[in-house]
Image (cartoon, coloured by chain):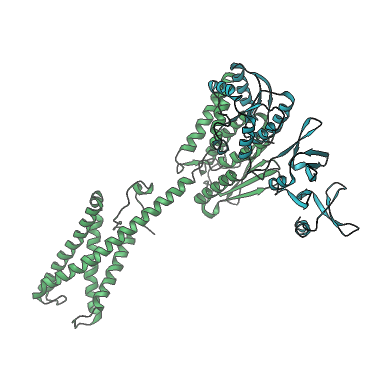
Amino acid sequence: MKVLIVDDEPLARERLASLLIEAGAEVIGEASDGRAAVEAVAALHPDIVLLDIRMPVMDGLEAARHIANLDSPPAMIFCTAYDEHALAAFDASAIDYLVKPVRLERLRTALERAKRFHTTAIEKVAETASTQRARSHLCARVRGNLVLVPIGDIQYLLAEDKYVVVHTGKGEVLIEEALKTLETEFGERFVRIHRNCLVARDRMSGLVRGADGAIFVKIEGTDATLEISRRNLPALRKLVRTL
Amino acid sequence: MAPGPTPATRDGTAPPYWLPDFCSAQVLFAVMIVAELLTVVILIAPSDETRAFLPRLTTTSVFVQWLALVSAVCLCKLRPQLERLKPWLGVAAAYVLMLVVTILGSALVFTLDQQLNLNLTLPPQFEARFIGRNTALCALIGAALLRYFYVFEQWRARIRAEGKARFDALQARIRPHFLFNSMNTIASLIPLRPTEAEHAIENLADLFRAALGNDAAQSTLGEELDLVRRYLDIEKLRLGDRLDVKFDVDALPASMALPALLLQPLIENAVYHGIQQLPDGGTVTIDGKRADGRIEIVIRNPRPLEHSRLAGRHGMALANTRARIEYHFGRRGTLDIDAGADFFACTVKIPDESRPDESADR
């Protein structure tokens, strides 16, 4: 049984590793934050992931959401130092979680039971637990490889057919999500300027008028200009003035 | 305003007193005012009296005040005994006491008046009427007064209890996360580095001794800074080289009295919302200085840019600390926040209450 340990505390990882060896599992890797965990799962294909909840960069709940979306995702067991309400709300039959310091017997049962919990259930649970908060990263796949895009890097999101193109300063990736749900989730960060476009508020550098009278948004540090629909114009003028 | 509460009531555990402290100046004054008002009421009521108002006011005042004060002094002296009775029995006893004082006082004054022939009361054949009238007045006014005191004392007891509850609610708390994370760290250390595990347990014990102790027990600034160091030592074990700490508190007077765990929650915030959220960690700085009769302590930490979702508990710890500072130092204590995009700083300013002869030994 190949296990990946995810925890931001070196001592906590160390202890889990020795317990896992004692329980007869094979530790194939360690990660110190949620983002590294998602990448490690994609690269190492573990059978089970032990996921800490509170971690920098990306927390365990969000990491679980991304991991559950991968092809043939591993079983996941949450580890937490203290029963947070996020976990208390979980349906006990849907997922398993361990409290720290973890007991060896408890770890053994968790490893045995892990197979029985469906990742779809975990995804659902993690999603419910983290719906109050927006994700910190978007997960995309480029030629089969996993790419995690920090929300802070995104300049604008452009809908094309059934995809959304995520534009960062460094390039663009496709994600299979609806612009509408992204707008709801990240409403604080992005503003809609057109039926097919969301722009990061802090990346707008100004408005320009095109030759045919249409108004465009300029994006900081790029040559990109994005057309504003007539409907969104009044709200945007107001926003740009306050920027 | 109110007479000083006895030690038994200060902690809110004693049953509410139904009888005020009649020996206190405030209550005596209130009794005298009520007695004087009663006198005026008696005098302006229609009667067949023929003497002038002022002389009557003087003699009646002296008489009523005398009765009231004798009653008050008796109640004051008998208060410990009365308090031991059941409340209803105590009230009845106090009431009877007042009536007895009035009856005996009236009888005495009437007899004296007759003997000295001053004609201040009533003709000799009306002794029973004089005593009876005074007793009836005392019975009515006394009942109202005891009732008033009872209600007033209950109200004061409730106010005290509420104040205590508010104060308790403000008691500094260490996050449960911290306890369980520390336990986990210690469990990891035992097989690897037992000496460090032992040291961590000692530190943890000190912290929880302070957290579970009585908040009213005053600690000192030096002890508080020691607690902060112990807390940070434990967190350093847990977070490894992600946590760096810079202390510059040599200027602070270590022996100045300070409520326990006033600073620690702010440091805990700095670690919990700052350092722990950064993959590469950072440095918590604690700077202390004295200026213009004030002590200023600045706690500063870096934090991730994406911090919008860290509100809740953070704000609570800050509000709690601010309330405690206000509670202890009044308007002279403040907690200021300077929140930047990638850093967070809070400044505690409290009056420098160290005695001038104290050396800044820390």
Looking at the image, residue A95 lies above or below residue B46: above
| Residue found farthest to the left | B125
Residue found at x 76% / y 50%: A201
Q: Which residue is more in the foreground, B283 or A229?
A: A229
Q: Is residue A33 visible?
A: no
Residue B10, compared with residue A54, is above or below; it is below
Q: Nearer the viewer, residue A194 or B80?
A: A194
- Tell me what residue is drawn at x 28 percent, y 63 percent: B145
* Above or below, A23 relative to B312: above
Residue A51, image quadrant: top right
Q: Which color was chain B given?
A: green
Q: Nearer the viewer, residue B243 or B348?
A: B243
Report the chain shown in cyan: A
Q: Position of residue B175 (x, y in %)?
A: 54, 38
The answer, for residue A201, to whether it is visible in the render is yes
- Against A234, residue A38 (above or below) is above
Which quadrant of the figure contains the C terminus of chain A? bottom right
Q: Position of residue A172 (x, y in %)?
A: 82, 39
Which residue is at a point 40% across and 52% down the rendered structure image? B160
